[in-house]
């Protein structure tokens, strides 16, 4: 199962400028929201009517006029790479609006209960944390309406961290990696109550991400886009040369 020319939008939301990604099947309008962590009204206004402030990056039409020939978007699911509050804090608002289920890996269930408290440290007033409706099932391709997403369990930043792969039949695949991998870096492994572990994170990246095609576009939770090939070649923490004397430690000291 693969999409053709998926319509992907990024919204950098909240004080940590977390990348929320919205993926739409142009042929049906079916849409999933990856990591709806903040600014829910901005997302809703844009997705439902191109009225709010537009996305920060998009492969789709820039206005309702341009979208005229496409089916209306219909949000079918909310899915999360992990449960840190910047990625999940406003899921309850999106879930109420769209009345669709929220999917999370079960190993992040406890972390999710802490979202409201974690947000307070940043002066954020978050709604009562959502409880996931369904589990993301690792090593399976889950169909959210007509949008197929392959679930790769990649613990290390959090216990239940997952990378979400959207396969494309007429272009490179796209993988939404949350805070597992960044352009030139990797996710923190020192955040309280999250189960972070650098060796586990590196094993997840080596085992689950590096086998993907080199031109796969990597959409991290923060910062620039990159590709699997670029990170394998250059990432100082987990790239192919890390730990072989080229970059030194290859991990946080
Ligand atoms: Zn995180
Ligand atoms: Zn984050």
Image (cartoon, grey):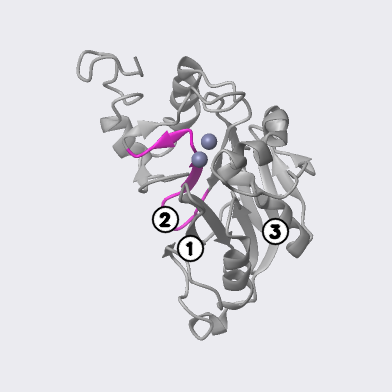
Asked whether residue 145 is in view, the answer is no
Above or below: residue 230 compared with residue 236: below
Between 29 and 87, the one nearer to me in the picture? 87
Determine if the magenta segment contains residue 172: yes
Q: Which quadrant does the C terminus fall into?
A: top left
Residue interval drawn in magenta: 167-183
Q: Is mark 1 within 8 Å of ligand 2?
A: no
From the image, tell me which residue sits under label 2.
Answer: 171
Q: Position of residue 88 (x, y in %)?
A: 63, 45
Q: Position of residue 160 (x, y in %)?
A: 63, 29
Picture quadrant where residue 163 is located: top right
Above or below: residue 44 compared with residue 243: below
The circle drawn on residue 5 is 1
The CA span between labels 2 and 1 is 7 Å
Picture quadrant where residue 215 is located: top left
Are the two marked residues, 2 and 1, in contact with CB atoms closer than 8 angstroms?
Answer: yes
């Amino acid at each position: 199962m693969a999409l053709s020319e998926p319509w992907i939008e990024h919204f950098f939301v909240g004080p940590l400028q977390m990348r929320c990604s919205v993926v739409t099947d142009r042929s049906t309008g079916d849409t999933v929201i990856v990591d709806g962590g903040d600014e829910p009204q901005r997302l809703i206004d844009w997705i439902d009517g191109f009225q709010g402030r537009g996305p920060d990056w998009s492969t789709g039409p820039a206005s309702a006029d341009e979208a005229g020939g496409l089916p209306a978007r219909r949000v079918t699911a909310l899915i999360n790479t992990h449960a840190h509050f910047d990625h999940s804090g406003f899921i309850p608002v999106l879930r109420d609006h769209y009345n669709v289920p929220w999917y999370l890996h079960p190993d992040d269930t406890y972390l999710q209960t802490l979202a409201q408290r974690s947000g307070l440290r940043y002066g954020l007033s978050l709604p009562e944390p959502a409880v996931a409706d369904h589990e993301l099932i690792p090593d399976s391709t889950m169909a959210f309406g007509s949008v197929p997403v392959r679930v790769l369990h990649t613990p290390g930043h959090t216990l239940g961290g997952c990378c979400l792969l959207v396969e494309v039949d007429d272009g490179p695949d796209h993988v939404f990696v949350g805070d597992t991998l960044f352009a030139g870096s990797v996710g923190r492994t020192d955040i309280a109550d999250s189960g972070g572990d650098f060796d586990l994170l590196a094993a997840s990246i080596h085992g689950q991400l590096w086998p993907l095609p080199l031109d796969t576009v990597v959409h991290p939770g923060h910062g620039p886009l990159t590709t699997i090939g670029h990170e394998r070649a250059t990432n100082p923490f987990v790239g192919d040369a890390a730990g072989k004397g080229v970059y030194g430690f290859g991990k946080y000291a």
